[in-house]
Image: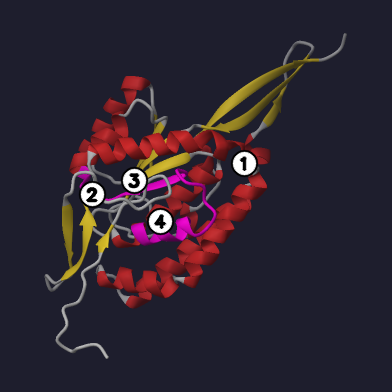
Amino acid sequence: MASANRIPVDKTYKIYIDGKFPRTESGRYLSLLDKKEKLIANVCRSSRKDFRNAVLAARKAQAGWAKASAYLRGQILYRIAEMLEGRAEQFVAELTMQGNTRRRAEKEVATAIDRLIYYAGWADKYQQVFSSVNPVSSSHFNFSVLEPTGVVSIIAPDDSGLIGLVSNVAPAIVGGNTVVVLASEAMPLCAISFAEVLHASDVPAGVVNVLTGLRSELTEQFASHMDVNAVAYTDSDQTTACRVQTLAAENIKHVVAREAIDWSSDSSANPYLIRDTQEVKTTWHPIGS
């Protein structure tokens, strides 16, 4: 029988890199407090070295993930949804601890599950929508098809603990990209719990890497790293947006701006979010003799 006087064990939420849950290389942590200034948990304050490790893992995994069939990627996203639904009560509790009402938390978790299923359904369909056979004035077939951009760094919405992260990660990975995502600074708990769901859902190591920490320390790395092919930012801070655009230009990195979006709305889910992190490849094939 547990003693009424025992001291509870405060949880330290680790980061997620290459299919593992390491502690931050920096050894630094953030104390997450509730509205009454009571400690909820300790959260890793990720460093630039953590980000570089995550990019290495994402790059290593990208080719294999891009070669996976659309059917397999869709099945894996559906499996993530299944696992998330099985742990729904945990996510509701975490969102509630971070300031959401229970009703709003339940809606956010349900929407995140539906969002994963939505993108799982698009896995084998977006190519038909966005690819084309182009008319040309020569004896050739000319095809345009989509290919994954590669490694995508994502700065998740700060005002959303779960649905904003899911709504940005799912379309990137269903299209064959691998990602490094910076969780919400204000509500980071669900991001690492979601990484635990990914870990148990047949997602290959390195496809999704999740960091927690301060935006002021990591945004520059997300935008400037030379082995990142695209960066997506989701907040409306114009100073940050300008900085991201400037840094990304140094290696002609694709920038995806998703500002002022209500991620809980059905209108925020669409196949154009998949296309955002795709490149168009055009192929010419001769016909005739």
Q: Residue at x 16, y 50 (%)?
A: 28
Q: What amino acid does circle 3 point to?
A: Thr
Q: Earlier in the sequence, mark 3 or mark 4?
A: 4
Q: Is 24 displayed left or right of 66 in the figure?
A: left
Alpha carbon of mark 3 to alpha carbon of mark 4: how far? 20 Å
Cβ–Cβ under 8 Å for marks 4 and 1? no
Marker disc for residue 121: none
Q: Secondary structure at mark 3?
A: loop
The residue mark sitting in front, 2 or 3, is 2
Image quadrant for the N terminus?
Answer: bottom left
- Mark 2 or mark 3, earlier in chain: 2
Q: Is residue 262 visible?
A: no
The residue tagged 1 is 68
18 shown above or below 36: above
Q: CA distance from mark 2 to mark 3?
A: 16 Å
* Image point (52%, 58%), residue name: 201
Separation of marks 4 and 1 at Cα, in angstroms? 21 Å
Percent x, y of residue 106 = 40, 73
Instruction: Identify the residue position indicated by label 2 in the image.
Output: 213
**Which residue is nearer to you in this view: 107 or 135?**
107
Q: Where does residue 120 sit, x and y in percent of width and height?
A: 59, 53
Which numbered marker is on residue 195? 4
Q: Position of residue 101 (x, y in %)?
A: 30, 75
**Contact (Cβ within 8 Å) of mark 1 with mark 3:** no
Tag nearer the camera, 1 or 3: 1
Secondary structure beneath disc 2? loop
The amino acid marked with disc number 2 is Gly
**Which numbered disc flags the more N-terminal residue, 4 or 1?**
1
Type of amino acid at the residue the image marks with label 1: Ala
**For mark 3, what is the residue?**
234
